[in-house]
Amino acid sequence: MATWQFSVVLIPASWAEENSYSSSALYDEEGYDTECAWKDRQPESGFKAVLGEIFPPSKSWHEELLTWGNEKEHDIQVWFENETIDGIHIRLDLNQKLNEIIIKVLKAAKTLNCALFFPEFKSVAEANEFELKNAIKKSNAAKFVRNQQEFLNEISKKT
């Protein structure tokens, strides 16, 4: 993932509600995995058309991966294991205008009955414009796009 890309992951809203919008069950010692959220909560069969309203389908590099968009800019990756979805990952290029894309992402999330998971913040939120825009504004990708040198200086101080 490029430094200027922001990552948001769709997870079933029913899972988010059952877990009180806590992301702790998504994490283990290796990082996060949304497979547990999708277990027994698969989207309707028309999910491909819903995601295709955000970005056009693209050629995947793996047989268990469906993709839309362009991985160097905005894209969606849907991973499958044993023919069931275990993740819907969306990356947004913060160097580009996002208003229309944000509306499309939120429409898709609501249509698919999903909540938003922000791996960078280890947080889960309802699929609404305030939550998504707020997370984007606070992200490292936004800091990088606003001022690359300041971002790199800040990172070097942490190491």
Image: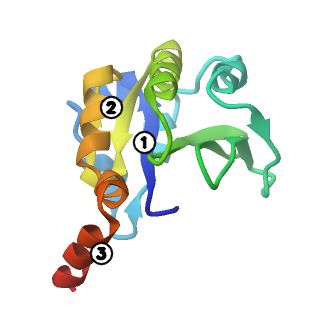
Q: Residue furthest left?
A: 157
Q: Quadrant of residue 134?
A: top left
Closer to the chain start, of discs 3 and 1, is 1
CA–CA distance in space, label 2 to label 1? 8 Å
CA–CA distance in space, label 3 to label 1? 23 Å
Q: Are marks 2 and 1 in contact (CB under 8 Å)?
A: yes
Quadrant position of the C terminus in the picture? bottom left
CA–CA distance in space, label 3 to label 2? 24 Å
Q: What is the x, y in percent for residue 48?
A: 71, 25
**Residue 31 appears anywhere in the view:** yes
- Tag of residue 152: 3
Q: Amino acid at mark 1?
A: Val
Q: Amino acid at mark 2?
A: Leu
**Residue 18 appears anywhere in the view:** no
* Residue beneath the point at 20% across and 30% down: 20
Q: What is the x, y in percent for residue 101?
A: 51, 27
Q: Does 152 appear above or below 52?
A: below
Q: What is the x, y in percent for residue 60?
A: 79, 50
Q: Which structural element holds mark 3? A: helix
Q: Which residue is mark 2?
A: 132
